[in-house]
Amino acid sequence: MNGRSSANDYVLVPARAIDDSRLIDFAGSVWPEQRPNFRVTSSWWRRAEPNCAIAAVHQPTGAMAGLCGGRPCQWTIAGRTLDAIAICDWYVASGHTGQGLGKRLVQHFDTPDRFLYAFSISDAAIANFKKLGWTGPHRSPLMVLPLPRLAGMALSLLADGGGVELMERELGGGDPLGALGTELDHIDAARGRDPGAHMRRGASDWSWRLSICGGRRYRFCIARRADEPVGYVVVRRLAPGQGRQLDKLATAIITDLVAVNDDPKVLRALALRAVAIATQLQTTIVLATISALTHQTVLTKVGFVSPAFPMIGRFLGRRSPQFMWLPRGAAAALRADEMMLTFADVAIDLDL
């Protein structure tokens, strides 16, 4: 097809406008080992605003040739709040490469005042991002806690509240945040004064996530000290039957873990509660990925295995998500060790 087509033969349209049959054909081309792939028809961007994902269509045949998702958010970098887009689901189908479609799809989301980044990306995407001037890649370690019930029993003997009070609440798709939104906004505002760079995680972003998360249910735990919210953790169980390797295990993920000033005592209290929640959810394994060193240290101390661990660490290291960003504007001097990334920062949580 490459010999008969040119870049002018392709048009970009909202991906939500693509019908199921063409979407499944595209998925079969991109992931032939998973065919037939019906999961793509329930992708997060099918429930989000039309501008959250763009598709390239080959006009002569009407075939879907490429896809790029853009998870909208805001970031705080060097004390400034910026509109941002997390690039995800970036693919060009076989037979349509060589037409510059990948570049066109990413540039669709690129404006001078936006921070662009990507998390959990393939080697092929990394090579293309480098051509576009992005920096990286850097790894955020994938961390695993096997058998949380046993770990929780051992940790309960060492638990020390550190003056932190914890409050839990469960929410699912479409549920209102209510008073929890005020707590999240308070934490987000306090973290806005922290050094480094992170995605804004207030009520607005979580309300958006809940509006498109489908059947996912989240267990929130807010940490309070001296009657002031100072952090939170969010845990959920993965739904079975999605065709993943993880379907063989009852798996929970720590979607997000946040503490004002990265306070180790607050992080420890929240990590311990996350283990307890995973036990209540009757899971056999808990996954987390957090780029911040302070968070990694706390999770290691409560029993999580990291890529630094002998033997299994090599397996985790190969599967640890990689991240990159476009170094421009406020992000021109940004360093990898200044960025705080979790499953919540992109669409990974909405894909698992």
Image: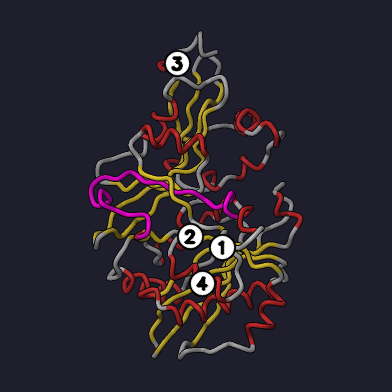
Q: Which residue is mark 2?
A: 342
Mark 4–mark 1 Cα distance, whole angstroms, equals 11 Å
Assess whether mark 1 and mark 2 are in contact (beta carbons under 8 angstroms).
Answer: yes
- Where in the figure is residue 224, as x and y percent of width and height? 44, 84
User: Pointer 4: what residue?
Assistant: 233
Q: Which residue is mark 3?
A: 9
Relative horizontal placement of residue 109, taking residue 154 as reference (left or right):
left
Q: Amino acid at mark 1?
A: Ala
The N terminus lies in quadrant: top right
Mark with earlier residue (2, 4): 4
Q: CA distance from mark 3 to mark 2?
A: 38 Å
Q: Counting residues from the N terminus, which is met first, the one under dot 3 or under dot 1?
A: 3
Say which element carries label 4. strand
Q: Is residue 281 magenta?
A: no
Q: Amino acid at mark 2?
A: Thr
Query: Residue lying farthest right?
Result: 248
Residue in the image at 74% along x and 51% along y = 241
Picture residue at 64% right of the left edge, 67% below the top: 145
Which residue position holds label 1? 288
Q: Residues within 10 Å of mark 2 (few under 14, many from 20)?
A: many
Question: How many residues crowd mark 1 within 10 Å: few (<14), some (14–19), many (20+)?
Answer: many
For marks 3 and 2, the one nearer the N-term is: 3
Q: Nearer the viewer, mark 4 or mark 3?
A: 4
